[in-house]
Image (cartoon, grey):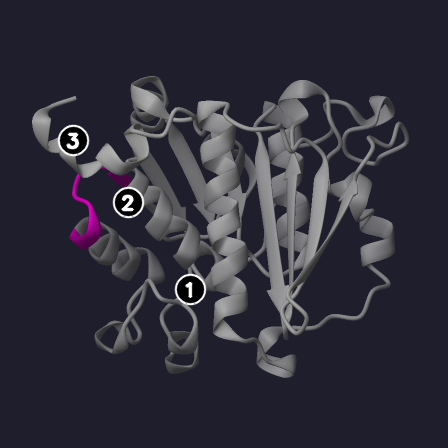
């Protein structure tokens, strides 16, 4: 690391939990962010600022005026631009060092598996069960850590899944068959407060950094729910379900996942 890098990252290098070894781990890491809405915006900004070596940014949506209240990667000049392109420009302005890889097309099948397998950590910032299930499935198949975030109204959720350590997966917490019967809600229908996605997206970035550097207590299988109205967190541990339709032994090696359009409303 040159003198410029030492100066840029000095405030986190001086932390004993990070130090030079942790900074070098961050600089050598690759994080995939699926969805560049409110959650992905906050996560991408903090990860780029922290010096993640490679960020793959996946979203096939374009910037809309209604996004700007909370999706802070994008600005008024970016309306109708692909979110991946506006994200690239914003992140490069913040820190030109990370390599940014853009996936502006629909991510599915082998392309989804390839993108997930190339990453050290995957952050899911999408807003629909179908995409979450397929990203989770790809993480289980490839053994890639997954940090999942969700937010709507004044409520946020955060979960860390470690298939690389034989832990629970997203489908252990939210079985696909149960999700099929759940009511569909989106921010465009119920609303969302901007700082809520900021908090959860920032926590996703933090969890990714914890996984990469190894500091702190592992959050494997931890699910957290945050109520912005009260400011209170509730935390639960998710045990692996031996009958899970994705990571259960009976389903090991199941078919390659597919994914619908990665449109984010968060």
Secondary element at tag 3: helix
Q: Please give the range of residues in magenta.
A: 93-100
Categorize mark 1 by other alpha carbons within 10 Å: few (<14), some (14-19), many (20+): many
Residue in the image at 30% along x and 44% along y: 48
In the rendered image, the residue lying farthest to the left is 3
Q: Picture coordinates of residue 38 (x, y %)?
A: 46, 64
Relative vertical location of residue 150 with respect to residue 188 in this rendering, above or below: above
Relative vertical location of residue 264 with respect to residue 173 in this rendering, above or below: below
Q: Quadrant of residue 227?
A: bottom right
Residue 249 in view (yes/no): yes
Categorize mark 2 by other alpha carbons within 10 Å: few (<14), some (14-19), many (20+): some
Q: Picture coordinates of residue 222 (x, y %)?
A: 71, 39
Contact, CB < 8 Å: mark 3 with mark 2? no
Q: Earlier in the sequence, mark 1 or mark 3?
A: 3
Q: Which mark is residue 61?
A: 1
Residue in the image at 27% along x and 37% along y: 11
Secondary element at tag 2: helix
Q: On the rendered image, what quadrant is the N terminus found in?
A: top left
Secondary element at tag 1: loop
In the rendered image, the residue lying farthest to the right is 243
Q: CA distance from mark 1 to mark 3?
A: 33 Å
Residue behind mark 3: 5
Q: Nearer the viewer, mark 1 or mark 3?
A: 3
Contact, CB < 8 Å: mark 1 with mark 3? no
Q: Which mark is residue 10?
A: none
Residue behind mark 2: 49
State left or right for residue 220 relative to residue 28. Answer: right
Q: Earlier in the sequence, mark 3 or mark 2?
A: 3
Q: Earlier in the sequence, mark 2 or mark 1?
A: 2
Q: Nearer the viewer, mark 2 or mark 1?
A: 2
């Amino acid at each position: 690391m040159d003198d410029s890098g030492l100066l840029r990252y000095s405030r986190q290098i001086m932390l004993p939990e990070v130090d030079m070894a942790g900074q070098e781990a961050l600089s050598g890491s690759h994080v995939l962010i699926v969805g560049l809405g409110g959650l992905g915006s906050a996560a991408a900004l903090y990860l780029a600022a922290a010096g993640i070596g490679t960020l793959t940014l996946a979203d096939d949506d374009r910037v809309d005026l209604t996004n700007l209240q909370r999706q802070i990667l994008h600005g008024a000049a970016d309306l109708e631009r692909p979110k991946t392109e506006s994200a690239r420009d914003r992140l490069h302005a913040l820190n030109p060092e990370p390599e940014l890889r853009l996936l502006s097309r629909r991510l599915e099948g082998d392309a989804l598996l390839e993108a997930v397998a190339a990453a050290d950590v995957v952050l899911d910032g999408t807003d629909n069960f179908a995409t979450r299930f397929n990203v989770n499935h790809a993480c289980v198949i490839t053994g890639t850590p997954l940090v999942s975030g969700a937010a709507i109204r004044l409520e946020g959720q955060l979960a860390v899944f470690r298939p690389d350590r034989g832990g629970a997966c997203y489908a252990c917490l939210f079985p696909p068959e149960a999700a099929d019967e759940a009511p569909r809600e989106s921010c465009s229908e119920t609303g969302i407060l901007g700082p809520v996605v900021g908090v959860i997206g920032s926590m996703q970035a933090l969890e990714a950094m914890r996984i990469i550097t190894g500091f702190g207590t592992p959050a494997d299988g931890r699910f957290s729910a945050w109520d912005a109205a009260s400011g209170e967190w509730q935390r639960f541990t998710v045990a692996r379900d031996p009958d899970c339709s994705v990571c259960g032994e009976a389903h090991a090696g199941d078919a390659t996942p597919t994914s619908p359009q990665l449109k984010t409303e968060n």
